[in-house]
Image (spheres, rainbow, N blue to C red):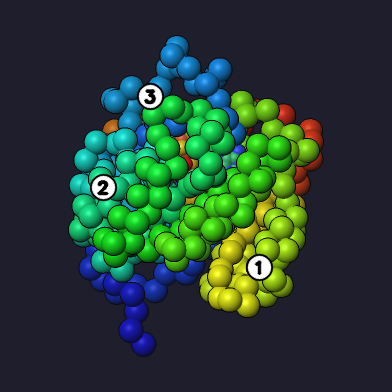
Amino acid sequence: MLLPKNPYNGPLAGIHVQRLPVVDVLERPVRDLRISVTDRCNFRCRYCMPREHFGQDHVFLDRQHLLTFEEILVVVKAAMGAGVTKVRITGGEPLLRRDITTLISMIREEGPDLDIALTTNGALLAQHAQSLKAAGLNRVTVSLDAVNLQVFQAMADTDRFTPTDVLNGIAEARQAGLGVKVNAVVKRGVNDNEVLPLAKALEQHRVPLRFIEFMDVGSTNAWSMKEVVSGAELRQVLSNAYGPLEALPAKQAGEVSKRYVTAGGREFGFIESVTAPFCGGCTRLRLSADGALFTCLFASKGHDLKAMLRWGADVTAIREAMTGVWQQRRDRYSMDRTEETATEPKVEMSYIGG
Ligand code: SAM
Ligand code: SF4
Ligand code: SF4
């Protein structure tokens, strides 16, 4: 039997070893690493970074506290050794991190077979799409909550960017040969009447549109269950317009989006983290911009890898720390969510990476 080559630079570097999958307390393997490269953003989405909490006087991470690309690479190598096959670059807005394409090429060089994706608000995507593809990025997920200018600008709390900027970014990304998916968070009374206009505007781009239920991430977005529009409700709206939707089987284990298709072949996805949580298949590990490891989007504290890295820890040491953290993991926040847990202190999504 051909055994996988040891991918990290410990004492067994280069030697073929059989490694058992690293699983947590609930038997979930670690498969995905989400890397936040910055806590800054050029939007102030009301559901993520409301301006009253992230205004002029908000103190963002100082450059010296951000992990360097070399440090991030050590974490990526360690994660590959623990079983990670997918890496997602996120933030904050990842396209604000200087030379982000350099990080992508570094990761690509280390993992020729890695699936590398990036989540962006799309505002700066048109100018970066070609170089992201050339650096080795496979896919982008673009967030777009409305095509109506007023609704878009109210939700993102911006007067600098427009839905056209994002749609141009989507077009450029496709042109460059990147895989593209679009995500829309729906809030009742805010953009629920944008569901069909969004579907129509994206028709010509031929990209899957996925709807995300508004979540109680962080401690600043004044979440309320009343503002959550469920996936079931959205499917009803779409089937009134497009005819019955047929459920598609999951492409792979742990897929968070439930996919549906119309008779005309249009695909829609639903990420129902509130009304149909999927913690049972959650294989995601998160690295914050300042190098803390989080095992759940709703965690209140992480595990500091930056200190280890700056004390000279190598890939093996980081992999062992990571494995230890994962093996202790028992997170299932969304499955235990109540109106009470929603008010508990949690780390902000722009910091931990969405
Ligand atoms: N700035 C990039 C963007 O917006 O795509 C990447 C980071 S953002 C935190 C990642 C994703 O989280 C976006 O799709 C955003 O819509 C989603 N998100 C942020 N806050 C959310 C919330 N309260 N509920 C649901 N999704 C949220
Ligand atoms: Fe920025 Fe993305 Fe958060 Fe919106 S969702 S404020 S674009 S990080
Ligand atoms: Fe994973 Fe935590 Fe979300 Fe559950 S609540 S799916 S454990 S990130």
- In this view, the residue in front, 318 or 157, is 157
Q: Is mark 3 within 8 Å of ligand 2?
A: no
Tell me the residue that label 3 is attached to.
61
Tell me where residue 352 appears, x and y as whole percent: 48, 38
SS label for mark 3 = loop
Instruction: Determine the residue positioned at 61% across, 47% down.
Output: 194
Q: In the displayed orientation, state which residue is furthest to the top.
A: 57
Q: In the displayed orientation, state which residue is furthest to the bottom.
A: 1
Q: Is mark 2 within 8 Å of ligand 1?
A: no
Asked whether residue 229 appears in the rendered view, the answer is yes
Q: Amino acid at mark 2?
A: His
Tell me where residue 227 appears, x and y as whole percent: 73, 38
Instruction: Determine the residue positioned at 40% across, 44% down.
Output: 164
Badge 2: few (under 14), some or many (20 or more) residues near its Cα, within 10 Å? some
- In this view, the residue in front, 231 or 203, is 203
Left or right: where does residue 278 sit relative to residue 204?
right
Q: Residue 128 got which mark?
A: 2
Q: Residue 294 got which mark?
A: none
Q: Quadrant of residue 86?
A: bottom left
Q: Quick one: label 3 or label 1, which is nearer the N terminus?
A: 3
Tell me where residue 159 appears, x and y as whole percent: 44, 27
Q: Amino acid at mark 1?
A: Tyr
**Distance from Cα at disc 3 to Cα at disc 1:** 46 Å
**Distance from Cα at disc 2 to Cα at disc 1:** 34 Å
Left or right: where does residue 292 sit relative to residue 148?
left
